[in-house]
Amino acid sequence: MGTIWTKFIDITPNKSIYRKLWRSSHSFNESIAELIDNSIDAITLEQKAGKEKLQIKISLYEKTKVIHIEDNWKWMNEKEASNALILAQSNKVKEELWEYWFWLKTAALSLGSTFTVSTWQAHTWIWFNFKYDEKEWEDNPEISWTNFPINHIEKQSEDHGTKIIIEKLKIKLNNTKITTLKYDLWKRYRWFIHGWMVDIFVNNKKCEPENTRWADGYPNDFEIETKFWKIIWKIGLMIEWNQKGLYWFDLFKNQRMIRTFEKFAIPTHPTSARIMGEIHLDFVEVTHEKNRFVEDSIEYEEALKACENSTAFKDVIREARKKANKEIITKQIQDKTDVWMEYIAKTLKDIESILEPNAKIKKETNLNHNSSTAEESNILTVEIEKRETRINKSDVEKPESTGERERTPKNTQEVNKHAININGKTFKFKHEWIDDMWLWRKDYKVDEIDWITIYTNMAFPAFMATMDQPFYAAMNISEAIAEIYSREWWYNIDKINEIKDLVLKKASEFKNQLKEDNQSQVN
């Protein structure tokens, strides 16, 4: 069967497409930025040479619900002004970030239903002006795709630039939006601001940098070669955690920020809340809305992999975890954990008589301590490794498949540790904080001389979520001891939770009783 005839049809878009365009994924800050992009891209030769600075002024009027954006760029001629209204039409070249040129349509219409553009050039007597009104565009048949009015107006001054006025706003202006916008524009265009080419003002207040409080030795600059192009980046640790989520990376393309505070190539963990920096991915494509990279592209995946495998990246992540853990486990936290250890040791003194009331248990007495003191509290004095800082498993060689940890003590200090008897066997137990991304919530080991070392893993997400680290450690200690009891007495797995709960219950009773006694003494 052959084609009978071919008919050519009109596929002019429906007028409503403009109204639908504003339903993009642009945020308020991104919409304003879209309107600034074209000004920066059209910077004059004098401005590039530093003879004249590009000034962009944004005025937001909360009461009248109007937004003004004005600049002193080179201007638009009649053809360029017309292109501003044609969908996807652009005078830009492919290498420039703003090549898509949806900027005016999507940005302006996401902010309000009416916008006016006025543009003028120095040393000329005429300037151009056009107004788009959403309702008039759709309802007036005299205005169409091929018949849209642009006004030619006599010009009196020698000024040059462009002004956009957006009215009938679809968003609500407030002080928070205005303050946030000022900070966002500085971050987004800081390379142009630092280069002394551009000044941006929001309600007559200049967008100026906010100093990042870097830790000593940071930030550091790096370059990573990929098969496409090199990645330029800056990375470092802040002095303090940022509890407002203002951390991680700003991602740039062609010196313009695409994403801010983006988790890129680092694991999701609260200890990374002090990592900050910027990464320039000039070879990675962005979406037409310019608010994200094309994350499914080969280029993006190559950039992500290159950063993840970077030694510099890994070093900063490791250092962030070290600093965080040192700050979390303060002397007060450690002292409270030691108190819980004493309550647990006291609880364990009689736990076997509860679990195995008919068993004949032989108590070992060949411990190197005063027997009467040990029987009183199950506490003994031993020599253990003295550490300047707490053990950090990320600095220790990974354990073999047997799960055994091997350490060689360097210095020793005399500390109080605890002893328990399980089925006639004496164990001394202690607790340590570790940081190991490969472990679960807790771990423990029993060595050849019957030392039980119980580890609370600070790398486990639940640790950072808890507000009571000493009690969190107490749960891990109780659970570990319950598992050892079950192993020594050949209990089934169901017995573990019963023993753990029993230990926590009785230890908490001791703690609460002490609190009540102290309170009665105060009263």
Image (cartoon, rainbow, N blue to C red):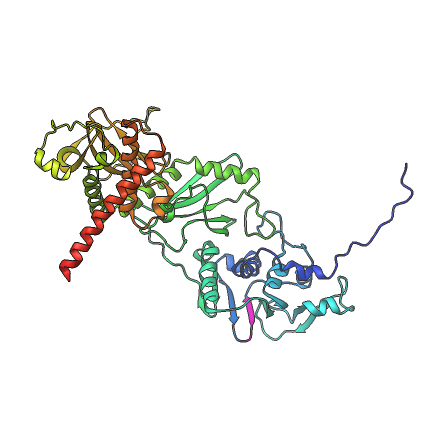
**Would residue 194 appear left or right of 157 to someone viewing this image?**
left
Which of 391 and 129 lies nearest the eye of the viewer?
391
Instruction: Examine the image and state in which quarter residue 438 appears.
Output: top left
Residue 224, position as x, y percentages in the image = 45, 38
Asked whether residue 65 is drawn in magenta, I would say yes
Residue 132, position as x, y percentages in the image = 67, 67
How many discs mark residues in the rendered view?
0
**Residue 428 in the image: above or below residue 45:** above
Can residue 94 be seen here? The reply is yes
- The boundaries of the magenta stretch are 64-70
Residue 91, position as x, y percentages in the image = 65, 54
Which of 55 and 415 lies nearest the eye of the viewer?
415
Q: Main secondary structure of the magenta part?
A: strand
Can residue 219 be seen here? The reply is no
Which of 147 and 240 lies nearest the eye of the viewer?
240
- Which residue is located at x 57 percent, y 70 percent? 159
**Residue 155 in the image: above or below residue 328:** below
Location of the C terminus (image quadrant): bottom left
Question: Which residue is the extreme one toward the front?
Answer: 358
